[in-house]
Amino acid sequence: MFGLREEFHYLQCADCKSLWLHTPPSDLSMYYGDRYYSMSLRDDPTRSLAHQAIAAALVRAPPSWLDRVATRIDIRPRFARYLAGQNVRRNSRIADIGSGEGDLLRRMAKCGFTDLWGIDPFIGGDRDDGPIKLRRAYLEDIDESFDVVMFNHSLEHVSYPLATLRAAWDVLRPFGSVVVRLPVLGFAWEVYGSNWVALDPPRHLFVPSVDGFKILAQRAGFSVERVFFDSTSLQFRGSERYLKDIPLLAKDNDVPRSVLDFEHGHIAEWEERAQQLNREGRGDNAGFVLKIGED
């Protein structure tokens, strides 16, 4: 991502094929910082009243209906798809684990959600901002309970994902749910291997297969209620950059014109291919909706 060009090694499970980083660095903080995407605030796509109304309606929509629509049109805001079918209301207490500076939570607040928590050990400090409470902490340190616990591309960053999922189990209210979105081994891994952009060493300490994540969730006490795929063209654009030894975050001035032209000429094709892979269950990012399993 940053062009550090350090070398890291992964181990692969012989059974489920999931990947685990071998001997991760003792201090991972240097691999985040201000340039890492979750530590900055981005443009907000939910400014309009129409977007807010759409979000409120879509969160209440059946997930099967929403999945069909989402594969054909660009629904905004996207978080509606993550929460669909979970009986989520605007006053539900929702935690985003690994929230960074709260970009997603701010979009949710604009759509009327009133009890939002961001939990991240790498942010600057604790602060409250209207309906949003940001806490510099690990989930295990929080003495609260939640209707929904979200891991939006954060669980792959923790050293012991099983322990973290069990911590989510501990703070979940009755009839609550956990939503985990993370990279999974799919088509892009098969094609690009170590140049796959979502491998992202050393920040991604583990990258599961779909079957591997289901095993992990079940060991934590959950049942998997729903799986959806939401990969994008980044799996192609980023991986093609790595094939050419170009950092993902390289400025345009530092990227050869031929590479920029190549990306521009293929972006529509890559987006279409990403959506097709999502429909086939072979995208490189997946979401899992978890409920507390029955004994």
Image: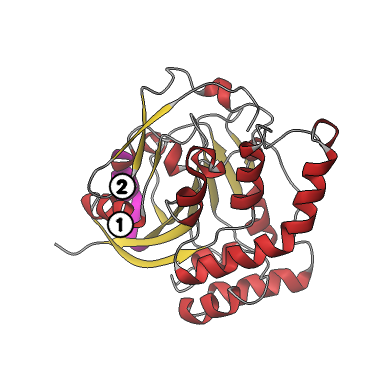
Residue 137 drawn above or below residue 52? above
- Residue behind mark 2: 17
Q: Quadrant of the C terminus?
A: bottom left
Q: Residue at x 74, y 46 (%)?
A: 42
Q: Is residue 228 visible?
A: yes
> Are the residues flagged by discs 1 and 2 in contact, CB closer than 8 Å?
yes
Give yes or no for residue 168 being in the magenta stretch. yes
Q: Residues within 10 Å of mark 1 (few under 14, many from 20)?
A: some
The residue nearer to you, when weighing 119 against 34, is: 34
- Residue behind mark 1: 211
Q: Is residue 111 visible?
A: no
Q: SS class of the residue under badge 2?
A: loop
Q: Amino acid at mark 2?
A: Lys
Alpha carbons under labels 1 and 2: distance apart: 9 Å
Q: What range of the chain is rendered magenta? A: 163-176
Q: Quadrant of the N terminus?
A: top right
